[in-house]
Amino acid sequence: MVREQALAEQGLRGRPTTEDETIIEVRVNCPDEATASAIAGRIVGERLAAAANIHPPISSRYRWRGGIERAREVPLVLKTRRSLFEAIAARITELHPYETPGVLGVEVALANRAYLAWLIDETAD
């Protein structure tokens, strides 16, 4: 009863709680800020993610087709629910110019309840 009252006070009654739904960060590197911004706008606009962070450029090294490549890339982090990972990964792959973009989902260990409620409200069912 105390838990239900606390959830109701926070606007969480009838909603998934941290035990029922997992927040993930979806990470993908983009070739430039324009690409990262375009993908972020589409993904958030389509409610596949509640928020996006575009980070400053980084220097990347990776193996590709038998060689070692160097690239300047822009990391994009999208905040969403684990249940939306497959949909968001497919959409990123459609929008991304790389032949094989690395789309990684990383579980968030902890989040405050208000943030969790907001993220769930702002993402697709």
Image: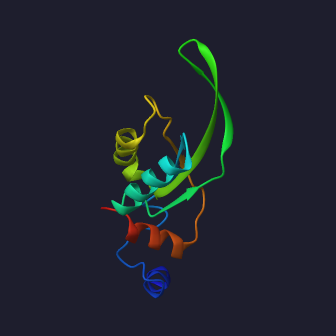
Vertical relation: 71 (above or below) 13: above
Residue reaching furthest to the left: 125
Vertical relation: 72 (above or below) 114: above
Query: Which image quarter is the C terminus in?
Result: bottom left
Left or right relative to 71: residue 77: left
Count of marks placed on residues = 0
Vertical relation: 45 (above or below) 91: below
Can residue 23 be seen in this snapshot?
Answer: no
Residue drawn at 43 percent across, 81 percent down: 4
Residue drawn at 33 percent across, 59 percent down: 46
Residue reaching furthest to the right: 59
Whole-percent x and y of residue 80?
Answer: 45, 57
Residue reaching furthest to the top: 66
Query: Which image quarter is the N terminus in?
Result: bottom left
Left or right relative to 20: residue 46: left
Vertical relation: 117 (above or below) 25: below
* Visual colour scheme: rainbow
Whole-percent x and y of residue 76?
Answer: 55, 50
Residue drawn at 38 percent across, 52 percent down: 83
| Residue closer to the observer: 16 or 88 | 88
Residue drawn at 68 percent across, 42 percent down: 58
Q: Quadrant of residue 21?
A: bottom left
Whole-percent x and y of residue 60?
Answer: 66, 33
| Residue closer to the observer: 89 or 10 | 89
Whole-percent x and y of residue 66?
Answer: 57, 11
Can residue 67 be seen in this snapshot?
Answer: yes
